[in-house]
Image: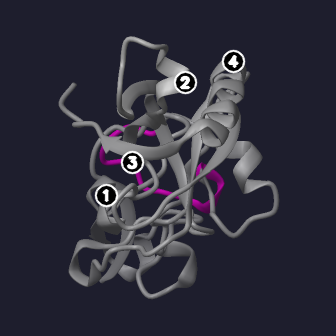
Amino acid sequence: DVRVRIAAVDLPAGLLLRDGDLDWRAYPAGQVPRDALREGTPQAELNGALVRRKVAAGTVLTAADFMRSDAPGFLAAVLQPGMRAVSVPIDDVSGNAGLIQPGDAVDLILTQRLSQETLGNNRRRNSVVSETVVENARVIAVGSSFQNQSSGDFKPIRARTVTLEVDPKAAEAVTVAAELGSLSLALRSFAL
């Protein structure tokens, strides 16, 4: 038997693949569907690839269904129409200890220290304030990686930047916020 890649669940166009999205199905050697992605080939490793078009659960996958993260133009292809990619600086604390991965949804929070002059004469000491700059932004890259790690070999990604998909107005707000104070990522649940 030859094992080929199949969709474990319905895959919407634009999805960045994770391990749980894919599965294997065995076929007798003479009955393998044409162009199927066979186990043991580099083409069958699709973690972090972009789904080009909607694929139903159980469908045998081919290379035409995906764009691999090492393909030219991948970042532009990942973006939804009208959206922008903006990178923000992070460290271990602001980036959730390296646990955020491509495909995750995050809120971007700005923290500022406001001095007495900024607040006016009613305050006698410095204050710290935070506000959410962007809500529910999709992470499209961590450092220079577009790929998620498989659960078996998961190690936190120690990166200095995270690239988010945002609308044009939010891209402007993120750029200004980066100059005003420190930025942190708040991971959102998939169950929202």
Q: Kindly report which numbered mark, 2 or 4, lies closer to the viewer in this rendering.
A: 2
The answer for how far apart the CA atoms under marks 3 and 4 are is 38 Å
Q: Dot 4 corresponds to which residue?
A: 169
Q: Position of residue 176 (x, y in %)?
A: 68, 31
Task: Check disc 3 and report its element: helix, strand or loop.
Answer: loop
Q: Which residues are magenta?
A: 55-65
Which residue bears the numbered disc 2?
Answer: 117
Q: Helix, strand or loop at disc 1?
A: helix
Residue 9: x and y in percent read 28, 43
Q: Residues within 10 Å of mark 2 (few under 14, many from 20)?
A: few
Q: Residues at badges 4 and 1 in contact (C-beta under 8 Å)? A: no
Check disc 3 and report the residue beneath it: 59
Q: Is residue 142 above or below residue 154?
A: above
What's the residue type where badge 4 is placed? Answer: Lys
First-in-chain label (3 vs 4): 3
The residue drawn where x is 58% and y is 67% is 143
Most extreme residue toward the left, as rendered? Answer: 191
Q: Which residue is mark 1?
A: 96
